[in-house]
Amino acid sequence: MVGGAGATNLLCFVGSWFFTGAALIQLLLSRPSKLRSLKTPTTRLEFVSAAIQFVGTARFNVSTGAALWAHRVPTRRRFVWWPDAQGSIAFLASGVLAVLAVTLTVGFVAPKSREWLTAWINMIGCIAFAASAVGAFITKRGVTEDAPLANVGTFVGALCFLIAALLMLPKRFSPDRESAGL
């Protein structure tokens, strides 16, 4: 490690707040409105998915904060794992609901749809985070069960979430705007 475990834990803690900020934005964008009724199953699934995702990111904040505190006390490191596991479970539930919402809209298999690709890439990220949580289990001796799995799962999950977010960005130029000279 370049900066040591303490610096890594601090970096993860700071990063977790950006993660939670993104989840809050998603929650706010998915909330019901005059145009989006909760009576519509897709809107309801999107909103509940975003709410669960937000709770999951808050659990990751607790986990990364606990890692800062428990870094020097091996017997306390086990307290870091439980919020991480809860966050991963919330992410899996959120991912399943997002896939259901997209399935209702575009169908079960629609690889040409940005929404479909985003939902499934996000789901792969959720599964990777769950694998990371399994690897990050802390034994009573304060040792991580499978550090490589924890690290690879976190990296793959974060990469999938980044790709999914980039896929959902609006297109900068549309054919209609270009042909109109705008």
Image (cartoon, grey):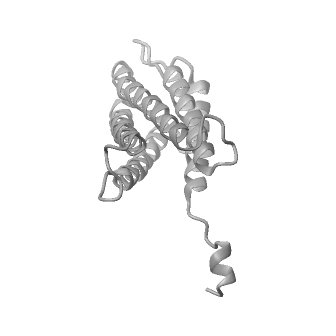
Q: Quadrant of residue 57?
A: top left
Q: Is residue 53 left or right of residue 98?
A: left
Q: Position of residue 159 (x, y in %)?
A: 60, 44
Q: Is residue 112 left or right of residue 67?
A: right
- Residue at the far top in the pictured view: 140
Asked whether residue 155 is in view, the answer is no
Q: Is residue 6 left or right of residue 62?
A: right
Q: Position of residue 118 (x, y in %)?
A: 58, 45
Looking at the image, residue 53 lies above or below residue 15: above
Q: Quadrant of residue 66?
A: top left
Q: Position of residue 179 (x, y in %)?
A: 69, 82
Q: How many marks?
A: 0
Of residues 130 and 117, the one drawn nearer to the viewer in this rendering = 117
What's the residue at 62%, 79% (across, down)?
177
Looking at the image, residue 79 lies above or below residue 7: above
The N terminus sits in image quarter: top right
Of residues 59 and 54, the one drawn nearer to the viewer in this rendering = 54
